[in-house]
Structures are given as C-alpha cells and as structure tokens.
Image (cartoon, helix red, strand yellow):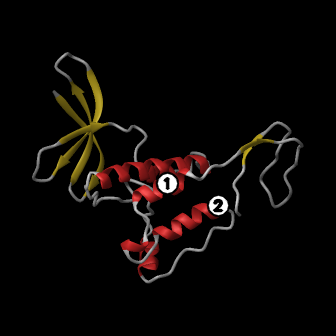
C-alpha cells in the first residue's frame, strides 16, 4: 500500500510526491512517487536532502567545499555515463535535478558564443572542463565517459598548516598551526 503525502517537486512530465510505502511483509519505507501525466506512477528511493539546486542556493547552510562540489560533478557524470552506455537519452538534465543554474541569461550567453570568465579564485582545471562543456556543437563537447575521466584526475591535496597566519583586513581566513587545508591549484 502506498500513502501519498506532500508534493516535493514538479516537472514537464508530472509531479513527485513524498510517500509511505507499506510492503507486503509490513515494513514501511519512505519513498518518492513520480506521478506521470497519462502514464502509471513510478516508485523511487526518497532523497530526503532534496534537489541539489536548493542545497546550492541555501544561504542558511555553509557553502559546500569545492571537494564536495567536484564529488557531486563526478557522481552526476558517472550516472549520465551509465545512461549514455545504455543508449538512453535523459532529456531532463535540469537545475532542479543537477548542478545547472536557473539563470536563463547563462543559457542565452552560451547560445550566442559568449562564455563566463574564469572566477577569480577558481581552479584552472575545473574551468577548462567547464569551458569544454560549452562547445557550440555536441561534437565539440566531451561525452560523459570523457567528462568522468577528466573529473577523476582532479584532486585537492589536504595539507596541515605549520605556522599561524592571522586574518588581514581583506581576508576572512585565520589559519592556526595544525589546521588542515585543501590546496586548490592553478589559480
């Protein structure tokens, strides 16, 4: 038996509802139900963390570390690589599902050949991968296997600080001896 609860999302093909699924042996599982327009529903695992885009724009939580963002990108690329190998076209790779922005201006910019500048403190390797993904035609862009391979090569060494450094006026960072820091190269 499935008990539908609150709506947790919507898209072109239907809505997603939080639900409780009581299995034949009596075990109850939280799940998400895709209620498709004109088609049967689909039961999928509930991801209680919600949509990634909501996490990325949540000002009440700390900004995710670059290592976590790269991990998200690696997982997304691996999932899309799998679908690509199964000859399945996703067709709904969108901000509410993944790491794409809601900002329509970025899409229009890319369509006319403009590119975002490399952010001042971003990693050069990551920006290069992002730039490759903006290729005008699909043939100019990496496929998901290539993308996963490129992302797998990116790592950020974890180092221990050997001397304290107090924050300067233009910096928010105070580093103490023994603090552990990720090194983001190619800046």
State if disc 1 and disc 2 touch (CB < 8 Å). no
- Seen in the picture, residue 99 relative to 2 is either above or below; the reply is below
Q: Is residue 57 visible?
A: no
Q: Position of residue 139 (x, y in %)?
A: 38, 73
- Seen in the picture, residue 177 relative to 26 is either above or below; the reply is below
Q: Quadrant of residue 160?
A: top right
Label 2 SS? loop
Between residue 158 and residue 107, name the one nearer to us.
158
Task: Write the residue at 44% across / 65% down.
Answer: 142
Q: Position of residue 89 (x, y in %)?
A: 26, 59
Of tags 2 and 1, the one toward the viewer is: 1
142 relative position to 127: left or right: left
Q: Is residue 129 visible?
A: yes
In the picture of the structure, the residue carrying the numbered disc 2 is 123
Q: Earlier in the sequence, mark 2 or mark 1?
A: 2
50 relative position to 91: left or right: right
In the picture of the structure, the residue carrying the numbered disc 1 is 149
């Amino acid at each position: 038996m499935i008990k539908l609860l609150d709506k947790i999302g919507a898209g072109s093909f239907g809505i997603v509802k939080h639900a409780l699924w009581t299995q034949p042996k009596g075990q109850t599982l939280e799940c998400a139900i895709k209620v498709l327009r004109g088609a049967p529903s689909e039961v999928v695992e509930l991801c209680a963390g919600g949509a990634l885009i909501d996490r990325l724009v949540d000002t009440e939580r700390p900004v995710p570390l670059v290592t976590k963002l790269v991990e998200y990108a690696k997982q997304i690329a691996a999932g899309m690589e799998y679908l690509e190998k199964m000859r399945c076209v996703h067709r709904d790779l969108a901000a509410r599902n993944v790491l794409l922005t809601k900002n329509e201006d970025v899409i229009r910019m890319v369509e006319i050949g403009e590119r975002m500048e490399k952010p001042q403190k971003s990693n050069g390797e990551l920006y290069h991968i992002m730039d490759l993904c903006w290729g005008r035609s699909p043939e100019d862009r990496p496929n998901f296997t290539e993308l996963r391979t490129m992302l797998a090569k990116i790592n950020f060494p974890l180092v221990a600080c050997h001397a304290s450094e107090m924050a300067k006026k233009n910096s928010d960072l105070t580093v103490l001896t023994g603090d552990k820091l990720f090194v983001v190269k190619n800046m």
